[in-house]
Amino acid sequence: MAKIHVSTTINGDAVEFLCEPEETLLDVLRDGLGLTGSKEGCSSGDCGACSVLLDGRLVCACLVMGAELGGCEVETIEAMAHGDVLHPLQSKFIEHAALQCGVCTPGILVAAKALLDKNPDPSETEVRYWLAGNLCRCTGYDKIVRAVLDAAADMRGS
Amino acid sequence: MAKDTDTGADTGYMGGDKELKWVGTRPPRPDGVDKVTGRAKFGADFYVPGMLIGKVLRSPHPHALIKSIDTSKAEALTGVKAVLTRDDFGDRSSEFVPAGEMMVNYRDIVRNVMAREKALYEGHAVAAVAATSNAIAKQALKLIEVDYEPLPHVIDAVEAMKPDAPLLHEDMITDGVEPAPTKPSNVAKRVEFTIGDVEAGFAAADVVIERAFDTSPVHQAYIEPHACVASVSEDGQAELWTTTQGHYVARAHCARLLDMDISKIRVTASEIGGGFGGKTVVYLEPLALGLSRKACQPVKMVMSRDEVFRASGPTSGAHMKIKVGATKDGKITAGQAELIYQAGAFQGSPVQPGAMCAFAPYDLENVKVVGWDVVTNRPKVAAYRAPGAPISEYAVECVIDELAKRLGIDPIDLRLANAAKEGTRAAYGPKFGPIGLVESLEQAKAHPHYQAPLGPNQGRGVASGFWFNIGGETCASLIVNEDGTAALTLGTPDIGGSRASLCMMAAEELGIEYDRVRPIIADTASLGYTFLTGGSRATFSSGLAVIEAARDVVRQLCERAAKIWEIPTDAVEWADGTAKPAGANAGDFEPMSLAAIAAIAGKTGGPVVGHAQINAQGAAPSFGTHLVDVEVDRETGRVTVLRYTVLQDAGKAIHPAYVEGQFQGGAVQGIGWALNEEYIYGPDGKLENAGFLDYRIPVASDVPMIDTVIVEVPNPRHPYGVRGVGETPIIPPMAAIANAIENALGIRFTELPMSPPRVLKAIDEMAAAE
Amino acid sequence: MNDMRYEAPDTIDGAVALLAGGRGEVRALAGGTDLLVQLRAEMIAPELVVDLKRIPELRSIAAEDGGFRVGAAVSGAELGEHPGVKALWPGVVEAVELIGSTQIQGRASLGGNLCNASPAADSVPAMIAARAVARVAGPAGTREVPVEEIAIGPGKTSLAKGEIVVSVLLPARPARSGDAYLRFIPRTEMDIAVVGAGVSLTLDESGVCSAARVALGAVAALAMLVPEAAAALVGTTLDEAALERLAAAASGACRPIDDKRGTKEYRIKVAGVLARRAALIAAERAGRS
Ligand SMILES: Cc1cc2nc3c(=O)[nH]c(=O)nc-3n(C[C@H](O)[C@H](O)[C@H](O)COP(=O)(O)OP(=O)(O)OC[C@H]3O[C@@H](n4cnc5c(N)ncnc54)[C@H](O)[C@@H]3O)c2cc1C
Ligand code: FES
Ligand code: FES
């Protein structure tokens, strides 16, 4: 059972790891690197709890092989706040009570940030469709959508 | 004000005129930053050095005798440290204990956790292994040889009731039937709730409507799968970290199943990624402890999503007959229901609460509800938000709507004319205290939503719902730190923000800033037994305990001030967060703040800590009314929810944002239940949609904003008037949507889910008939 | 335990050599949104996985003879951001963009959708309607294959061992042409098509349909071209009668199964409904007034 040696960049840091061929990026982050902010809700691409950015694209970490990561850049929820300054989306999620249990929250925040980086002024419908791959069973989505729209407005203002 | 003898404290309603600083506001939750940064540790986020990975072998058959299990090859595999089968669990006799709002039987739990004589559903655990890696554990499962003798299976409850149906339990004699049947069957129990004389009621009716309804089992579908880490040392001391709604209840079950002393098992509840009732039961915990006990190494177990669907939850599917009679002017004269709920492989469907709730929103003289609890070859049902009630109330609320149409009365007016209110005797026994159904209906009627114009192919529906709510055993501690901050120790896991509400009540009582109270959910060794988070009880019961603990602190603070001032304790009063002399006679002293007293607590008798250990009573029911607009695509059968409003009595919303969140989340779960969620079985008795791609819970683009109106009719048995709010919101959506579709199309659907193929078929049949 | 190997060659020849030389089951990897799910479910257990994403030809979009050559491993998100392809073949692009969520879009490719050979693959009916041609490279050289000939059954392709799809050519199209793809799913997102319908058509100056292709997905073992449905449109102005005939022909061509995603009768009925709706959108895109 040959382990694969991979050099990559995670949250701006150069990282090297060994992984089994069948391990996913999510396995590498959680089991290998202790980055447990990305959650596993299904490991089949259906829930979005494992959302991360891979070379700037929003992807499900459970559908990326660890072995593929050589030379790539990965960004996870752990990189969203800077020092003790939360990203506006993070603050708005707390302010709007846009989480109940919070297990979907890291994935939704990563996805919402990818949206606002691309489209600073999304409509409610655009937010809903962009986040359709992020399941939340607790909130009914209302406060999540409001928090994203409010964060977008704030970020445009500043 | 009534002294509450059950808690030993004066916890009656304080009245609405006291000015409140925190209660009713929307401060940030204490665990907010941990949750938005990924720092919060959920069930699968625990890693312990030397940890093994545990996996479960599951039955591929829906019903089979297990003739033998050979684990020798698996045990011989390098890296395998322990294997568990039925032989590792002693049998348990029949004994029912409460779990959430439902009862469970140890005889059945031990069999559900690990199949004994038979595998009773596809996915039933048959063996478990612990190994040094995931891959080795998976390989070991393949090496376990199980000799099954497949048996005929039965998936549908009505089929299961037939005399020639395959029998799941050879010794099951129907309970509650006189005389007791002599032959075993799949019918576990009959329940009945009756008041008055329904035959006389129907005779007095001008209109009688009788309808049959079917609902499909639906899963709680929490996003976080079941997960735990167990560590048992060589001397039998056990640590368990698990995602659960009740770690004390989990501890009790594990101790019983594994023959361990309760004191030997310390359970820490992780952050919990949703439960909705489904995490009130143990699945992995006894297996992880058992494996760890054998291996003397920590063992981590996490369910896959597939396992969650096949082997945990869901709630019952049901077959129901409802009959309602009324006079021309809209007075309901009788209500009758027959409810058949499927329980899954072991008895204990929520048919009893379903039967109790069916007609509870109405003030009726004649009611008869009969329920049947039926076992089938499916996973054992678990509680799901207001267990049982959404099913029976769906059926009744559809018939009420039809009645309104038949009588030409506005559906809200018909409900108002018959609504339960203070003093109404419910069919299941008690008399209601002050309740908010009428208020929710009146506010629904006055809401702009109810008057808004509708377009073509659109319809509007309304439905109401009722749930009891519960109290129960609860502890809390409140520690005053030397700098005047406070640590709040709680026993109810926080699923939806309850820590915020509980800190707000503590801050309110102590008169200190909210952010000076820091909460933790204690492990089972650090705080007394606390019943689980469920039954909408966390904010209510832990709230009562917190208030009592805070009042204990205040008493002690007054004592300390009295000591310092050298005056009698009853000459000191607590106001605005300070101890003050009670009136001019008491003496002339500068008021002392909590911080000032705390700073010198060492000199006045030691630390100040308040405790409460109560059996919370006085939980009050919550009623709600929902309004929904839908649009139907007549060519594809798709139903789109356009607008949704929830109006529900919260008694008092401590943190209104989290109350709204409960309303919204429940409504959207109900939308899923109404339109798309279902368990689909093949003829082979195997589940075909065990994943989120085909078990279709609503996604963000499926639903509109969910408007909320918090109605506040205070609960007289709580200082701030709190009622539980978490469960009622899932009750009205299915009927509200069915009623809206009827309003749009003129077609009454009596089967859930109202999925596109079903809707299109009915539209085409109607067109063909015309 | 698991001796699966992972390779990421950067040339087509390298990939072909690896895949052709593999001892047991070998698999190409594009976005992995099918492959990883199948691996996890233990539906497949390849000895070798060959990642195609480091091969430039498979990752680029280039103009060619008035059309576009789209690399087989280009992700849905990349394709959706390409203004040229979207302007020329909006129906194909909308079909690719319907695949999965935003996250799936970040990885899922047209080539993977085609080679996974699911009868419900969304991009395939749209590509068939668009007369798209796949370029296949293998040990025996390169060949050009109409996309409808790639899948030969659920999960099965006509590709020989060592063959990969390098790119798909979306051809040039005449003036006054338009295409559209619609699918039915029970939710608004995150479902596999119960029925899919792709229509591509050209109008003459007077608004009469001069050419059309209609393809359906999820209603038979393979996505299929329905010439009778196209014939119903040609020579008409897409009047009500023509649309009725189109719907009837589309429904009539269905050979569906009953499964967890829909019943036979439902699929048959909705195939007609979607073909008709897609035809109207395509005609509007072709400039129908
Ligand atoms: C949550 C989720 C939602 C989805 N929703 C949809 C949907 O709405 N509609 C839909 O159609 N599909 C859907 N899919 C399936 C999948 O995303 C698509 O089929 C996607 O286009 C596959 O592309 P890929 O690049 O990820 O393929 P991969 O997984 O990389 O490959 C798929 C198959 O094709 C082979 N292959 C890939 N590229 C080549 C090549 N160039 N040459 C030869 N063989 C090749 C692989 O060996 C493999 O067998 C969904 C999947 C998920 C997980
Ligand atoms: S865990 Fe990756 S999408 Fe669910
Ligand atoms: S907050 Fe619980 S799943 Fe979203």
Image: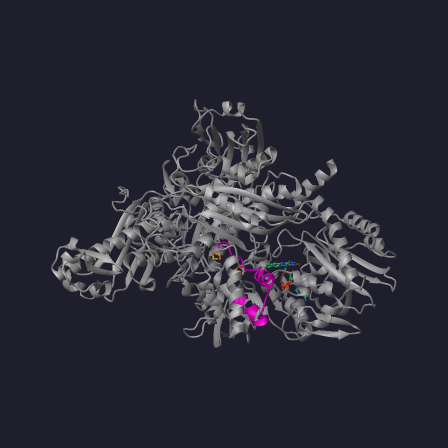
Of B653 and B737, nearer the camera is B653
Image quarter in which the N terminus of chain B is found: top left
Q: Residue furthest left?
A: B566
Query: Is residue A125 one of those drawn in magenta?
Result: yes
Query: Is residue B584 one of those drawn in magenta?
Result: no
Which x, y percent locates residue A14?
48, 77
Q: Which residues are magenta?
A: A110-138
Q: Residue furthest front?
A: B584
Question: Is B280 left or right of B318, judged from the image as shown?
Answer: left
- Up-down relation of residue A47 to residue A33 (above or below): above
- Up-down relation of residue B129 to residue A48 (above or below): above
Question: Is C257 left or right of B69, judged from the image as shown?
Answer: right
Ligand 1 picture quarter: bottom right
Image quarter in which the C terminus of chain B is found: top right
- Up-down relation of residue A148 to residue B324 (above or below): below
- Is residue B189 visible in the rendered image? The answer is yes
Colour setup of the view: one colour
Of B429 and C101, nearer the camera is B429
In terms of image quadrants, where is residue B734? top right
